[in-house]
Image (tube, coloured by chain):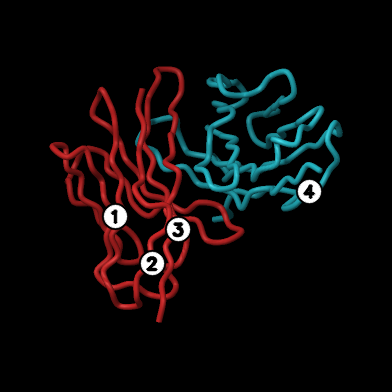
Amino acid sequence: EAGVAQSPRYKIIEKRQSVAFWCNPISGHATLYWYQQILGQGPKLLIQFQNNGVVDDSQLPKDRFSAERLKGVDSTLKIQPAKLEDSAVYLCASSLVRAPTDTQYFGPGTRLTVL
Amino acid sequence: AQSVTQLGSHVSVSEGALVLLRCNYSSSVPPYLFWYVQYPNQGLQLLLKYTSAATLVKGINGFEAEFKKSETSFHLTKPSAHMSDAAEYFCAVSLNTGTASKLTFGTGTRLQVTL
């Protein structure tokens, strides 16, 4: 079974530029998550999708971050414009259902550096 | 609000020694608890999870954790450390908000294994 795929793996941009990350979850997984992991910290949930609908985006900085999950499969996370404090690893995860006991499977992440 | 606290950002053990990584939780309802491992430049991988069945949970790679309600703890242990265990370990608690299922992570413990 293929795991969660993410691209690119690394991205370096200047502040005020825009950037987009792509995620392909495990086939059949209805729930998709985007996390932000700042160096030295644990991952923090940014947004959660159930199929193609948003169920939690309470910690997404909506003035600069946006995300979509078209057709309930792939997802993209965009930052526009980027700030220095956005430097982090962006992790995508997926789970079969939305139960609190369900295992989340993580992709390798995209490491973003904002200069 | 639910949260987890990981005591010790860095733990160093000798190969063959006992591994003990500490996690304490705070929750107003019975929690679901997870341990994830993150190897360098990789995503998170589930080690084990507590879902209110057995209080002693066995996971992959010889790790286990015991849920102790009286101590609000879910410490991770392994009897004998191996060099390949060197990684970052995250404790997490799961919250079901009704519309979403959310993992809240601790700040992580980096395990170093020496010869």
In this figure, what is the number of numbered marks? 4
Say yes or no: labels 1 and 3 on the same chain: yes
Neighbourhood count class around disc 1 (C-alpha, 10 Å): few under 14, some 14–19, many 20 upward: many
Image mark for residue B12: 2
Kind of element beneath mark 1: strand
> Mark 2 near mark 3, Cβ–Cβ under 8 Å?
no
Chain at numbered mark 3: B
Q: Are marks 4 and 3 on the same chain?
A: no
Q: Are callouts 4 and 1 both on one chain?
A: no
Q: Mark 2 to mark 3: distance in Å?
A: 8 Å
Residue under numbered circle 3? B110
Q: Residue A99: give its label.
A: none
From mark 4 to mark 3, how far is it between C-alphas? 25 Å
Query: From what the image shows, is residue B36 above or below residue A15?
Result: below
Indicate which label's residue lies in the foreground, 4 or 3: 3
Q: In the picture, one chain is red; tell me its letter.
A: B
Amino acid carrying mark 4 in the image = Lys
Observer-nearest of A111 and A9 = A111
For marks 2 and 3 on the same chain, the one whose residue lies earlier in the sequence: 2
Q: Secondary structure at mark 4?
A: strand
Q: Residue at x 72, y 41 (%)?
A: A22
Query: Disc 1 versus disc 3: distance between alpha carbons?
Result: 13 Å
Label 2: how many Cα within 10 Å (few below 14, some 14–19, many 20+):
few
